Image: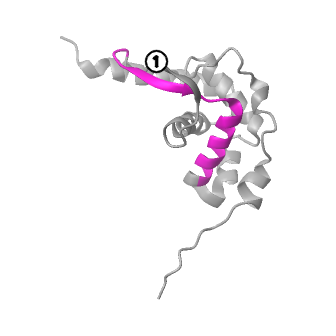
Amino acid sequence: MSDPKSHYRDAIVSMTRALKRLVDEDRRYKLEAYIFVQNALSYAQEHLKMGSGPPLEIQGPDPEVTETTRHVTGRELCEALRLYALDQFGLMSKLVLDNWGIRSTSDFGEIVFNLIGIGRLRKSETDRREDFNEVYDFNEAFCDKFQIQLKRNVS
């Protein structure tokens, strides 16, 4: 009898190998950039409740498990990526993304379509790489409009 977790482990190993090959083939972006985009998509769907249309049933990393997801547009994902970066890295967001090779929303599109190319993400018939072009300016989104919220003690 096989270990029920072995399918999940094998899927994780396969996903890791696919991402490693992707990073080796396209050196513009670091592995962290791909993981960040995947995590931000989950953040968009689960925390921000982004996505339209009826939920889609897709197979997850474990062949025995299906996941329910909603389609997020390129523009929506760019906004989720901005909010997720600010949540995770605060004022350092632009520096972290730059270190990973991400310098514009167009880079988000390149990463998304690379992930689609290896089967890690799915696209609709209307999704295009250009949907990610010039959605916002990184300096404005991560530096100019950044505000630190201070909590005041009321005496």
Say if the magenta span includes residue 81: yes
Say if the magenta span includes residue 12: no
The N terminus appears in which quarter of the rendering? top left
Q: Is residue 142 above or below residue 7?
A: below
User: Is residue 110 visible from the viewing direction of this image?
Assistant: yes
Q: Is residue 26 above or below residue 103?
A: above
Give how far across and how far down residue 115 sits, in percent: 61, 24
User: Is residue 61 visible from the viewing direction of this image?
Assistant: no
Seen as rendered, the residue at the extreme bottom is 155
Near-viewer residue (76 or 40): 76
Near-viewer residue (1 or 37): 37
| Rendering quarter of residue 7 | top left
**Point 58% across, 47% down: residue:** 84
* Side of 68 relative to 110 (left or right): left
Residue extent of the magenta highlight: 63-86
**Point 61% across, 30% down: residue:** 72
* Side of 133 relative to 62 (left or right): right
Per the image, the residue denoted by label 1 is 57
**Point 75% across, 43% down: residue:** 103
Q: Is residue 17 above or below residue 75?
A: above
| Rendering quarter of residue 30 | top right
- Residue type marked 1: Glu
| Rendering quarter of residue 25 | top right
Give how far across and how far down residue 79 sits, in percent: 67, 42
**Point 61% across, 38% down: residue:** 33
Give how far across and how far down residue 29 sits, in percent: 67, 35
Q: Residues within 10 Å of mark 1 (few under 14, many from 20)?
A: few
Give how far across and how far down residue 151 sits, in percent: 53, 74
> Callout 1: helix, strand or loop?
strand
> Colour scheme used in the picture?
one colour
